Amino acid sequence: MSTQRDRKENLAALPLVAPFVLVYAALFVYPSLEMLVTSFTDGALTKSGDWVGLENYAKLFRDRYFGAALRNTLYFVALTVVPGAMFGLLLALVVNNLKGYWQAIALSVFFVPFILPVSTVTAIANLLTDTANGPLGGLVTSPNGTVIPVWRSATWFMPAVAVLTIWWTVGLNVLLFLAGLRTIPRDIYEAAGLDGAGRWAAFRYLTWPLLRPITILVLTIQLISQIRVFDQIYLMASQGPGRSATVLVQYIYSVAFQRNQAGYASAVAVALFALGVGVVVLQFQLLRLRRTR
Amino acid sequence: MNATWIKRLDLAGMAILIASLVLVVIWAFPIFWALLSTATPAETAGGFFRTYANVLFTTDLGRWYLNSIVTSGGVTIIVIAISSACGYAISQIEFTGRRLLWLLILGSFMIPVQALIVNHFFLVYQWGLLNTWLGVILPQLIAPIAAIVYKQFFDAIPREFGEAAFIDGAKHWQIFLKIYLPMNWGVTLALAIIVFIGAWNAFLWPFLAVTKPELMNVTVSIAEIRSYGVSGLAAAMMAGLPVAVIYLLFQRRITDAITMSVGITSDK
C-alpha cells in the first residue's frame, strides 16, 4: 500500500519538479561531471581532446603559477573574511545603537554599495585612488615620500582590493548581524543593567556569545564567496601587477580562454571545487562540534 | 547612583555616537564623491544632468541597458517559475529523491559555480548560443537561493491549508498555483528583486558569453569599453542606477528576503 502511495506522490511531484530538475541536470550536474572528465584530457576550449590520465593533476603540483594563484586566493580570503565579518559586526552595532530615522539611513549607507555592480564599484575605486586627483590617491607612499599607485604595486594590490571588497560587500554582513542582534530579547540587557554591567561587559558576556551562530554563518558565507573571487581582481588588475595578483578563478579563465587548454583548466577548476567542498565539510564539522559540546 | 557615574555614561555614549557618525561618513564618502565628480565636469560644458544625458544619448548605453534588462528579466522569470514549483514540491510532497534534490540545491549554493565556466562555455558553444541573450541567461539559471527560500516559506505554512483543499479533490499543482503561491506574492516579489539584481550585477559569465559590443550587458560593456574621465564615470554610475533605485524602493522586502534566505527568522 505504501508503494502505491509513493507512486501517487511521485506522479503529483513530477510536473512541479521536472523543469527545475531538467535545468539543474543540464546546467549544473552535467557540466560538473563534464569538468571531471575534461580534467583527464588535453581538450581545447571548443574541441574535445584525448585521454591523458592524471597528467593534468601532476602538472598542478609542478605549475608555480597555479601555486601562486592558490596562495593569492588564500591571501585574499585571509584579508577579507575575518576583517569583513568584524566590520560587519561593528557597523551592525552602530546601526542597532541608533534610533528611528537615523537607523534606516545608516543601514542604507552601509548596504547600498553591496547592491552596486562591480563595474560601478571599480570605477569609483579608480576615481578615489587616482594618484593625481583622487582624495585617497596619496595614501600609500614609499619611505622617501613618493606616492605608490596601489593597483600597480605587487605588495599593495591585494590589501587594496581587500579594502575595496570590504567596503563593497560588508552590507550583507551588517544585515545578517543586525538580524541576529534583533533576535536577542531586550530584557536580557535590562537584567544585566540592573547588576551594573557596563557596555563592554554587556557586549562581551551577552551579545557576543549570543551572536555565535550568526558569526559562524557570516564567516561561512564570506569564505564561500571569497574563494570564488574574480570580478574586482580581474578589473583592477588590468592596470598592472600582472601574474603576482592572479587568483584561482582568474587562472581557470586565463588557462582556458587565453591559452586554450580546457583540459588543464578543468583540473584547476576541480581543485577550486575541492576547496569549496572542503569549506563546506569544515563548516559542518564546526557546527557538529558546537552541538556536541 | 551618583552624578559622576551618569556623567561617565554620557561621555561613553557620546563617544560611541561620534564614532558611529564617522563610520557612516566614511562609508558614504566614495559614492558621494563619485556623484560630486560627475556634477562638476571639467571636460564637458554643462552641469550634472547634461553629463548624464550626454552619456545616455551619445553612447550605446540604451542598447546595453536593453541587453541587461532582457537577460536579467529572463533569468528572473525562469528562476522564479521553476524554483517556486520545486520549493513547493520539496516542502509538501513526499516523493522519491526529495532529500537528494534538496542536498543538490544546498550543494550548488555552497560550491563555487565559477569553476564550471569552461564547461558552460563549451555547452553554450555547442548549442550555438554564444553572443545571444539565451546564452547569457542559461548558466545563470543555477540560482539556488530562490528554491531554498520558497521551501522554507512553504514549510512554515500550516498543513491545514493544503489538506482542506485536498479533501475537496484538488491536485498538488492546483493547490500550489491557487493557494500557496498567491498566499505570498510578497516573498515572490522579494525573491524576484534579489534574483534580478544578482543577474544585473553578474559579470563573469556575461563577460565570457558575449564578445560583440552590441550584445553586451551594461556592467560588462562599462568595464570593457573603458573610458576614463567624467563621461566614463557617469556611464559607470548609470550602470548601477537601476539596481540602486530598485533597492531604495523595496529596501525592506530585499533585506527581509536576504535574511530569510540564510535561515534567520525575525520575529517581526
Image (cartoon, rainbow, N blue to C red):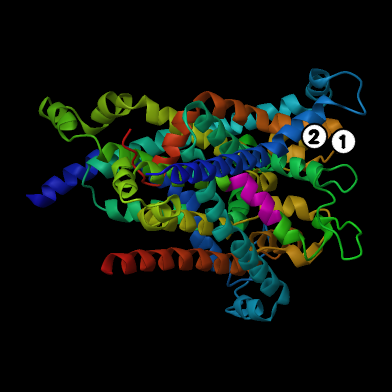
The range drawn in magenta is A161-169
Helix, strand or loop at disc 1? helix
Residue type of the residue flagged with mark 1: Gly
Q: Nearer the viewer, residue A209 or B205?
A: A209
**Chain of residue at mark 2:** B
Q: Which mark is residue B233?
A: 2
Q: Which mark is residue B83?
A: none
Q: Position of residue B237 (x, y in %)?
A: 73, 32
Q: Quadrant of residue A244?
A: bottom right
Q: Is residue A257 above or below residue B63?
A: below
Measuring 40% from the left and 37% from the top, which residue is drawn there?
B82
Q: Is residue B59 above or below residue A6?
A: above
Q: Position of residue B44 (x, y in %)?
A: 91, 24
Q: Nearer the viewer, residue A119 or A206?
A: A206
Residue type of the residue flagged with mark 2: Leu
Measuring 88% from the left and 18% from the top, which residue is drawn there?
B46
Helix, strand or loop at disc 2? helix
